[in-house]
Amino acid sequence: MNGHLTEQDFLNKLYEVGRDDDHLSQCALCQQRWKDWSAGRQVVLSQPETPVEFLAGQRTRIFDRAEGSSRFWLMKRWAPAAAVAALALLLVFWNISGPKHPVPPGTVETASTTPSDAQLMAEIYRTVYETEPAAVEPLRGLFEVKQ
């Protein structure tokens, strides 16, 4: 070989691929660079040491969370049912408060109602509550019994 080892040569040597030659055993500069590469690889491959205090604190926090969640287990379990019950009660009381059926005109008369006003109100009542949509008329003809 006519020169020093390149970075690619060192990478190949780290992964144990490539050619084997005796340049590394003869060249002091390449031997020093190879020691640096090997030391860097050992640093990358070594497991970082985790302090015992950190692990103990982490374990304590896990146990605290597990213990804390059991305190509110009953409340968490029944909260949806309580919310549904409250909503049902709200709907029941909301429907009770209003009148169920409108009062037909003519049953309650006021002093200011004249016959023309009463007739107008009766016509409005018939229009709103007794008139069926125009699309229903042809359908009624389909179900009439013809003799």
Image (spheres, grey):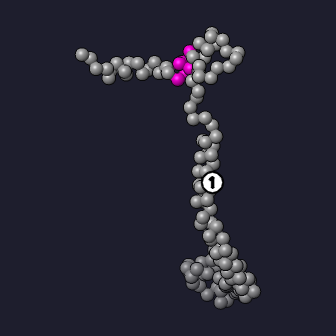
Look at 65% across and 77% down and name the residue there: 66
Circle 1 sits on which residue? Answer: 86
Question: Would you identify the image quadrant in which residue 125 lies?
Answer: top right
Counting labels gives 1
Question: In front: 135, or 1?
Answer: 135
Q: Amino acid at mark 1?
A: Ala
Can residue 5 be seen by looking at this rendering?
A: no
Question: In front: 37, or 132?
Answer: 132
Q: Secondary structure at mark 1?
A: helix
Query: Residue 81, relative to residue 138: is it above or below?
Result: below
Q: Residue furthest top?
A: 116
Name the main secondary structure of what is drawn in magenta. Answer: helix
- Magenta residues span 123-129
Image coordinates for residue 40, horizontal then vertical, percent: 70, 81
Query: Residue 141, relative to residue 6: is it above or below?
Result: above
Quarter of the picture holding the C terminus: top left
Quarter of the picture holding the N terminus: bottom right
Q: Residues within 10 Å of mark 1 (few under 14, many from 20)?
A: few
Look at 67% across and 15% down and name the residue there: 113
Q: Residue furthest left?
A: 147
* Residue 128 colored in magenta in the image: yes
Query: Residue 98, relative to residue 50: is it above or below?
Result: above
Image coordinates for residue 139, horizontal then vertical, percent: 37, 22
Question: Would you identify the image quadrant in which residue 146 lies?
Answer: top left
* Residue 112 colored in magenta in the image: no
Image coordinates for residue 48, horizontal then vertical, percent: 70, 83
Look at 60% across and 41% down and name the residue there: 95
